[in-house]
Image: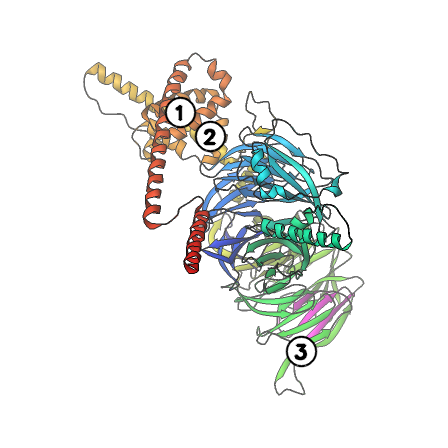
Amino acid sequence: MGLTKQYLRYQPSAVFGIIGSQKSNIVFLDIRRTRGKYCAVGACENVLIWDLRTGEKFSILKGDKHEVTIICRCPDKRHLAVGYDDGTIRVFDLISGDLLITFSGHKSAVTALRYDRQGLRLVSGARDTDVIVWDIVNESGLFRLKGHKGQITQVCFLKETNVLITSSKDTFIKFWDLDTQHCFKTLVGHRSEVYDFVLLKNDHRLVTGSSDSELRVWDITFKEQDAADTAESPEKKLKVDTSEDEEEEEVGEENELSILKCTKVGSVMRSGRDRIVSMVTDESESVLLCHGNDANVDVFTLPSEEKLKKHLSKREKKAKRKLKEDDGAGEVTVEIKLTDEIKRMTAVKMATKVRALDLLGEESSSVKCMCLLNNNSIQTSTIHIDNKKAELSDVKTLALPAHRTTPRTTCFSSDNLAILSASSESIKIWNRDSLQPIRTMTCDYALASMFAPGDRHVIIGSKSGRLQIFDVSSGSLLEDIDAHSGPLWSISMAPDKRGIMSGSADHNIKFWNFELIKDTDSTSKRLTLEHNKTLKMDEDVLCVKYSPDQKFVAASLMDNTVKVFFSDTLKFFLSMYGHKLPVLCMDISSDSTLLVTGSADRNVKIWGMDFGDCHKSIFAHDDSIMCIQFVPRTHMFFTGGKDRKLKQWDADNFELVSTLQGHHGEVFSLSISSSGNFVVSGSQDRSLRLWEKTQEVLVLEDEREMEREQEFEEVISNEMEAVVPGETTTEVALAGKKTAETVKAAERLMEAIEVYKEESANIQLHKEECRKTGKELAPPQLNPLVMAYGVTSPTRYLLEVIKRIKSSELEEALLVLPFNYVMDLLKVLDIFLQAGWEPELSCRCLLFLLRVHHGQITSSQMLLPVIDRLRSSTLSQVTQLRDQIGFNLAGLQFLQSQIERSDEVVFFKDATDRLREKKRKRKKRVILAIKT
């Protein structure tokens, strides 16, 4: 094999400049027993936990490659479930930040997540219209529910019964019985997509939001509820006025087998006319907030039963008084209306459009609201609900470490220690090591930027055609030059550092010299730009560049060509044509021999500067190429495009070296440090990414092999779902999906079964030889795979292999096993259960195999004695486990009662109710003592 050129790998170093992604929601967290201080929000593929009081990052929960779409906190306040754009769900530990569980079942982005009351189950809904229920304890999927025809928008467990409610963009809300795993009720009262819902009054009231201004309200009545109790309950005493909805059709026919009854009782109106985005209520259900795609947040108060009774009595007295004044006779009947139970206060206006919000109840008269805004910031405020206007107070904004809009241009300082990024509203200078903003300066819509020589000044080219000069130390604008009459698309520094060149849409290329002038009111000199000469073109100038030897000037025009001129005389030298669409970016190598161009036609062309010949044309990206730059002192260059990718190329061999994936939006800017060790890129997802050169050697053949493996994994994930023989229902399916990991797990399991059979045969042969010779012979050498697991028997080795398969991948791995391996595995499971090894795992594998291969197993005569033995051994092992768990529970309950008696400490369930009852009795005794 001949010598090949070695490349060093660029790896992602950090993501900065983003506070919260627009696809994610935001949630309050309770960490270190502190409420209202921390929040979690998705930022590209990571979850950032912010300290709202200090405005600093508390921790980062790192993801893989895909963007965060939904976050859900666990009721135990120690875990956080995160859904991603590729359909995976990860569960993190909030204290340590470790990844605990990974669930892979959806084919597209996860759009809804919710824990049950105990935090033992998790339900997820996705864009693929499926709903999956996951077992957190067993770390596996329970089942997949099919029935919706549109994207799932919200999911929720009922607290008291084993029922799940789901809403979708197919305009339906479905009620699922999780015991029988079927949909027993569908609400069809919506005329358009259902985007969110909340449950109130201990799951007896449902409020749904759609694409109109109406919030529909439904009452849920459980069938097993005692009629006498319902008649005496104060909730049922309040009659709801449904006169407004008499013309509404009765939605859905009630089935006698239904667990509950859901009837529409009316609707309330919100201020916004567009679709609802989200709704949220606090823990005490005293306030309900909802918002659309604008900056307004509607505030609804939910009075308690006591307040409703007082309000009812006041209204009744007022009606009686009015009746007396009118000298009328008759009975006064006053009813509580729905607008009294869900009372709209006002619409609170936030700083800008609200993307997501969360609520935290502080006191009886106020709640703390937190909003993720559309401009990459978080706003926290307190809403006083006792005030009729529901005014905001304590408004704080977390916005400093991020741009409000997309960063359009980036560059490094000459010493590579500072990074400049500029957007449509501000310039930020970042410390490369700490990634903290050093200086923030307000500017026009920036399209191009650079550090002036000495790194003490910054020059910005704006969309309005102005050149702005800023002083870095003071952060002030020194001069605002009206340079062009159109957008100033590009600026380039002269290699001798004496001036710059600017190109604009006004068909002009202007040359500027650096000058030091003294203002009349100042004794010190300041930097300015003096116009030297102008080169007029026939088309809009999109990009300009000096050659490093300062011999030529290159300019790309709107007519798809690149014109090269002599820099001293500005005489025409070359015209490079071949692109089908305008050239948006270009660069010249350090030795001034090569020029690379990136165009909107998605091609990169490599040109020679001596004759203007095209060395190579490469189809580089799947969308327009927005930025391109050579690595200093090399013929390597980077490109960034609207396909969200950065690519590294070799201009000598015309080869793709590597693809840097990480951005979740169009890449607009790219800058390489003068040392070539760092690359910074800015994207439409409002994030800035730093890539660092490592000493790891990159082999092109290995890179191509990894790309082929990724394509293979994508093909596997897009395959049809597995079908279990004998199951014809289309409503329930397996929770997991086939992935590369499940295929590898199945291969390891088949290999382990082969090794087990081989080693068992060797051991049996050794025993027969010992019996024939009558001597104790040396045991045969174990297989290296068995020895690698640190076990001494093939049976233990097979058990270890099964144990090391992830619980979430076990069923999919067993599903692809051929039947001859299934027969061998059933015989081994019989050995496991008789020996009492891992009875839970063994029973899970056994029951799944029986479910999948029931017909073949029951018709096999060879497996008949094995199944008979398994029937008795599984029953005995499960009974033993159940007795052990029951004994442990009884012992724990006894210890709990003993501790409560001795220390007057209440544990676990109903703790707050008991403490409240004790306080009430103690207060009553104190009042009686004072009176006596």
Residues drawn in magenta: 484-512
308 in relation to 789, above or below: below
Residue 829 to residue 15: above or below: above
Task: Tell me which numbered mark, 2 or 1, is placed earlier along the sequence.
Answer: 2
CB under 8 Å between discs 2 and 1? no
Q: Of circles 3 and 2, which is in front? A: 2
Q: Where does label 1 land, which residue?
A: 754
- The count of marks equals 3
Measured in 3D between alpha carbons, the distance from the residue under mark 2 to the one under mark 1, in whole angstroms, is 12 Å
Classify mark 3: helix, strand or loop. Answer: strand
Q: Nearer the viewer, mark 3 or mark 1?
A: 1
Depth check: give the residue in front, 469 or 268.
268
Q: Which residue is mark 2?
A: 746
Closer to us: 67 or 149: 149
In the drawing, does residue 84 fall left or right of residue 784? right
Q: Looking at the picture, which amino acid does disc 3 mark?
A: Thr
**Any magenta on residue 835?**
no
* SS at badge 1: helix
